[in-house]
């Protein structure tokens, strides 16, 4: 766990820094992806910013609904800037819905837009994994693997680092798909397929899986099924 990053005389909060860095990388990669797919990079940047704001609001609301007891004594903590009080699933739901509505209003091609955003979003999720590791959230069950050792912050296995490395690889694969001019939707479907797999793996190691809080695993399974079905459908249609 590394909540504070010491750079000379400067002491910086690691978790917010990683979230902000992730958003910056996402924005830059989105503009680059827009150029690769022939979209207006400025329009894509505006749509992304609005969708991210909606996603953050949805992530906080979903977290409050999941853990209402944490906010019962201090309701003002709902507006706390702490990034770990966010539900990734809720953020994806709200942000994704907002993105689709905004894209439709701007008459942007959905598949190409999703392709343009996929690599950058994967990089952002990689930084989120590092933020989880720095904050010490999502403790894992070290007994599941013989290699599970004691880590700083009480973590017993680097599952959050597996998440970070996995999504970084997904991001680079997405960038490669864009550069070789893959068919519309291919980069997005590949990101969803691999992302669902990494979500299931991460959820498997989480210590709270036995308490019924397996939303991450359910979302991962749903993504795998939907992406796999769509990829199979596209393959049959092409053949």
Image: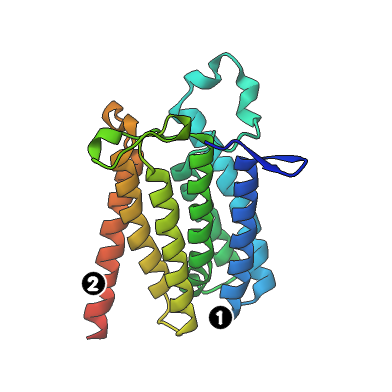
Q: Residue at x 62, y 24 (%)?
A: 77
* SS state under label 2: helix
Q: Position of residue 107 (x, y in %)?
A: 57, 72
Which residue ends up furthest to the right in the rendered image? 9
Nearer the N terminus, badge 1 or badge 2? 1
Name the residue at 56% across, 80% down: 36
Q: Is residue 97 visible?
A: no
Q: Is residue 89 left or right of residue 205?
A: right
Where is 81 relative to 93, above or below?
above
Mark number, residue 36: 1
Which one is closest to the eye, mark 1 or mark 2? 1
- Work out whether 193 lies above or below 108: above
Work out how far the residue at label 1 is from the one at label 2, CA to CA, in angstroms. Answer: 25 Å
Front residue (pair 181, 54): 181
Q: Are circles 1 and 2 on residues that touch, CB within 8 Å?
A: no
Q: Which residue is mark 2?
A: 232
Label 1 SS: helix
């Amino acid at each position: 766990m590394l909540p504070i990053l010491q750079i000379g005389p400067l002491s910086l909060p690691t978790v917010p820094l990683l979230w902000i860095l992730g958003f910056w990388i996402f924005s830059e990669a989105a503009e680059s992806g827009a150029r690769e797919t022939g979209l207006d990079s400025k329009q894509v940047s505006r749509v992304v910013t609005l969708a991210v704001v909606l996603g953050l609001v949805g992530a906080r609301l979903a977290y409050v609904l999941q853990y209402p007891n944490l906010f019962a004594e201090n309701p003002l903590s709902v507006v706390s800037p702490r990034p770990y009080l966010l539900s990734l699933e809720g953020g994806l739901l709200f942000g994704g819905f907002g993105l689709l509505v905004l894209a439709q209003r701007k008459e942007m091609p959905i598949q190409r837009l999703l392709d343009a955003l996929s690599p950058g979003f994967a990089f952002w999720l990689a930084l989120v994994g590092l933020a989880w590791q720095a904050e010490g959230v999502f403790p894992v069950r070290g007994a599941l693997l013989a290699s599970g050792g004691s880590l700083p912050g009480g973590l017993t296995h680097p599952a959050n680092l597996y998440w970070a490395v996995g999504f970084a690889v997904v991001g680079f694969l997405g960038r490669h798909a864009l550069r070789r001019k893959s068919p519309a939707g291919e980069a997005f479907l590949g990101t969803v397929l691999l992302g669902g797999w990494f979500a299931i793996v991460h959820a498997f190691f989480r210590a709270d899986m036995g308490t019924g809080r397996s939303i991450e695993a359910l979302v991962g399974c749903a993504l795998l099924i939907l992406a796999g079905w769509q990829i199979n459908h596209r393959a049959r249609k092409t053949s």
